[in-house]
Amino acid sequence: MPGPGKVICIGLGPGDPELMSLRAHRHLTGARIIAYFRKPGRSGQARRMVEGMLPAGVEEWPMEYPVTTEIPFDDPAYNAALAPFYDHWATRLAEGTAGGDVVVLCEGDPFFYGSFMHLHSRLPEGLAEVVPGIPGMAGCWTATGQPITWGDDVLTVLPATLPDAELRRRIGDTDALVVMKIGRNLPRLRAALAAAGRLADAWLVEHGTMPAQRVRRLAEVEGEVPYFSIALIHGRGRRP
Amino acid sequence: MPGPGKVICIGLGPGDPELMSLRAHRHLTGARIIAYFRKPGRSGQARRMVEGMLPAGVEEWPMEYPVTTEIPFDDPAYNAALAPFYDHWATRLAEGTAGGDVVVLCEGDPFFYGSFMHLHSRLPEGLAEVVPGIPGMAGCWTATGQPITWGDDVLTVLPATLPDAELRRRIGDTDALVVMKIGRNLPRLRAALAAAGRLADAWLVEHGTMPAQRVRRLAEVEGEVPYFSIALIHGRGRRP
């Protein structure tokens, strides 16, 4: 039987540690065990965000993604390869609750494109608790200094991994736009924005709210962009 | 000349005061002056959220919307009637910065459908600072206990004020869905969801993260819903 503790996944927000919630901070600073995803050989963004904020004696459980350089990240086989990894960690986190809460760190908001869901769906009903966080996109639109939506704007959030034609169609069919998962898809995204006649309105925010934050017009950006990049177009206040 | 202080708009998050960020809390508890919108005769949601957290001696500037019962909220004339009100308060907030920072309270995230933008656009460049918050929708999808998006899901955020045909079209053209500004539009929204074949998948969250929180299948909801209501449909993890 798992419990009496819970698996508490805390959303840490967009990057700046001061943007985590009071509740996330309470769970973090009172933690007995913290767990977080990372790639082997990396410290991991979630873990970096809490540097200097951990209580003395906390136990750390890095959940290292299996090496998968042989499978592209967007191949369904990639997720299939991850299933035993998630199974293992769901079991281990549940066992960990025998001694109290186990706190899982998550960038942004856990239920908005977060990896925690793969553990959440494997944990016994009622054992997991989620503390929402400020999504990365909110940190990014705040960094641009302009509202993303007002009035009756429609907002569309797209992954840049969509097929070209669908990217283009959806970019042309919304007031405000947020594009996630850009990475190597920047040239395709730029072409889709141009085809939809909206390239001049698009911004790219890299490392939003972090020390390396950079805000540029997307049309001016060449080459690769970091994983923590979001493209956006501000709404203009549609009237009903 | 305004300044040396700033007008700092802090996002308070979805409702539960413990979900405000550490930074919002720092500005709040160190405030000399706080300002917040409210309807005449009401305490105002933003002000209620910070009850018991204000420093001794803080000055309160309630910004009371002019009485506008004669104009529907979604009529463009409504905003026109508000222009002098926003002009007045932008001037007063700017003047207030002569003595230090002025803190403006805002539910949710200020740049996501927030009223602060009407002040922001009137303030001198560089005088305003925005602290992002957890949007109401993130509190609501967390309340349902399921992720709103994963994999390559497309998320669409709609105001329920859109025309029927457009509501229906957009509801049928997305993986995950969030609908704001429901209020009196619930019957129209329900019809649009049914016409798009998605009524059975829709949830209604009232007062998300607040003591009165209620999560129901939208199909089961009759009559009026409170202002702080959000409808949503979870994505299913689209694959590229």
Image (cartoon, coloured by chain):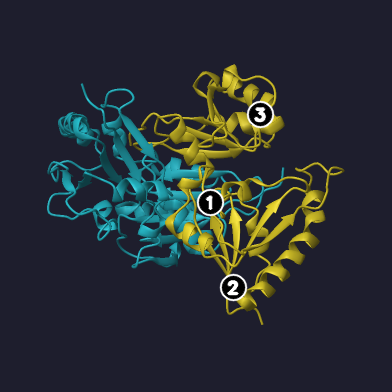
Chain colours: A yellow, B cyan
* Label 2, residues with CA under 10 Å away: few <14, some 14-19, many ≥20: some
- Gap in Å between the C-alphas at discs 1 and 2? 20 Å
Q: Is there one chain holding both mark 1 and mark 2?
A: yes
User: What amino acid is at disc 1?
Assistant: Leu
State the residue position of label 1: A12
User: What amino acid is at disc 2?
Assistant: Leu
- Residue at 40 percent across and 46 percent down: it is B23
State the residue position of label 3: A225
State the residue position of label 2: A127
When asked about the image quadrant of residue B204, the answer is bottom left
**Measured along the vertical axis of the image, is residue A240 above or below residue A39?**
above
Disc on the earlier residue, 3 or 2: 2
| Picture mark count | 3
- Residue at 39 percent across and 28 percent down: it is A236
User: What amino acid is at disc 3?
Assistant: Val
The chain to which mark 1 is attached is A
- Farthest residue to the bottom: give it: A1
Q: Position of residue B158 (x, y in %)?
A: 44, 44
**Measured along the vertical axis of the image, is residue A50 above or below residue B121?**
below
Q: Is there one chain holding both mark 3 and mark 2?
A: yes
From the viewer's side, name the closer residue of B40 and A22: A22
Determine whether the residue tagged by mark 2 lies in a helix, strand or loop.
Answer: loop
Q: Position of residue A101 (x, y in %)?
A: 58, 71
